[in-house]
Image (cartoon, rainbow, N blue to C red):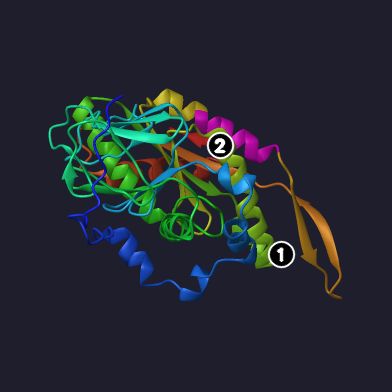
Amino acid sequence: MPETARSTSTPAVTRMPPIGPAAVAAARSWDASTLRLSKNELTAFQTQGPAVAQQPACLILYSGEDAGKRFPLEGLALTIGRSPECPIWVDHPGISRCHAELLRDADGYLLRDLASANGTHLNGLRLELPTRLHDGDLIRLGKVALKYYERQSLDALLHDRIYRMATVDAGTDLHTKRYLMDALERELKRARRNDHPLSVLCLDLDHFKLVNDQHGHDAGDQVLHRAAALMKLQVRGTDILGRIGGEEFAVVLPETELPAAIELAERMRQALAAQPHPLEVRGDQGQRTVVQHLQTASIGAARLEPDMADGRALLAAADLKLYSAKREGRNRVAG
C-alpha cells in the first residue's frame, strides 16, 4: 500500500486543542496528589519486557466533551467516524460517518482518509495517501484532534487517569452524572436525527439509609460497589450506566424500545435481589464480623416521546416511574 514520506519539519499544529468543559470543570475540584502514579504503574514502564511490548497502541482524544478518552487499537482495519457502527466512534458534527481508517500491518498502523467532507490531517498536513503513523503523531479529523501512541507511555497513562477522574465515579466505578447527562443529550439528538428509539432507566436502592445507620458508612460503600458491579453485568456494551446521586443510578439505552427496557430493568432487579452482600462490620467492642445483607432496588423506565424537550425531561419521566415503583411496595419495576 502506498505511503507518503514522513515530514521532518515542525508540525503545523503545535498547541494542544482545548479540553472540553466537562473535564475542565472536574479538574477544578481535583486533588493534584491523585495524579501521582503508583510504584506498580511506574514499574510497568521502567521495565523493558514482553508484557510492556504486548500492550496495544492507542488513540487519545484531545478535544471535545470526551477529551482524554482512550481508544485501544486492536484489529486489522479500524474505521473512525460519527457512525455508532465505527469501532472508533467519535460523535462530532464535523466528522463524516466513516471519516478515516487505520490499517494494521507488520510495522504498525497506516492512516487513510475515506473521502471525508472535512479531510484528515496528520501533524498539520492534509492526508492525500495512506500514511504510516509514528508514536506521538497528531491526527485531526475536522475539528477533532487525536494523538497516536504506538506503545504504552507515561503520557498515555496520565491522559487515561485524567479522563477516568473526569468521567468515572470513584465509589462505584460507574460513569459520573455529568458524563451520563452529556451522553444522554448526544443519544437523544442521534435518536431524533435517525428516528430511532431511546429509553432510560432510573434505579434507587431500597431503604439504603438503613445500611448506613445500622452498619456504618463503610458497609454502605461496600453495598454501593457490589450493587454497581451486579448492574454492570446486565447492561449491554452500548448502554451507558451511571451514578446520579447517593444511591440513585440511571441507564441510557440507545436503540431500545420501552418493552425491552423494562425487560432489562427486571433482569437488573432480579440480579440485585438474588445476591446477598457479605458486609464486614465493626462490633461494639471493635471486633470485625461478616453479616449477610440483601439489597433490593426499585426501577422506573421511560421512552423518549416527541413532546420531551431534552434529556432531562426523559430522565424525569423515568424518575416518576421509579417513585411509582416505590409507592407500590419497592423491589419492582414500573414502566
Residue 305 seen by the camera? no
Q: Is 144 on the left or on the right of 163, as rendered? A: left
Graded by Cα atoms within 10 Å as few (under 14), some (14 to 19) or many (20 or more), the crowding at tag 2 reads some
Q: Is residue 276 visible?
A: yes
- At mark 2, the secondary structure is loop
Local crowd size for mark 1, using a 10 Å CA cut-off: few (<14), some (14–19), many (≥20): few
What range is drawn magenta here?
A: 264-274
Residue shown at 60%/66% (left/top)? 38
* Dominant SS type (magenta): helix
Asked whether residue 30 is drawn in magenta, I would say: no
- Return the residue at label 1: 214
Q: Nearer the viewer, residue 115 or 28?
A: 115
274 over 167 or under it: above or below: above
Amino acid at pointer 1:
Gln
Check whether the beta carbons of the residues at disc 2 and disc 1 lie within 8 A of each other.
Answer: no
Residue 269 is a magenta residue: yes
On the image, which quarter does residue 184 sit in? top left
Q: Secondary structure at mark 1?
A: helix
Q: Which label was assigned to residue 332?
A: 2
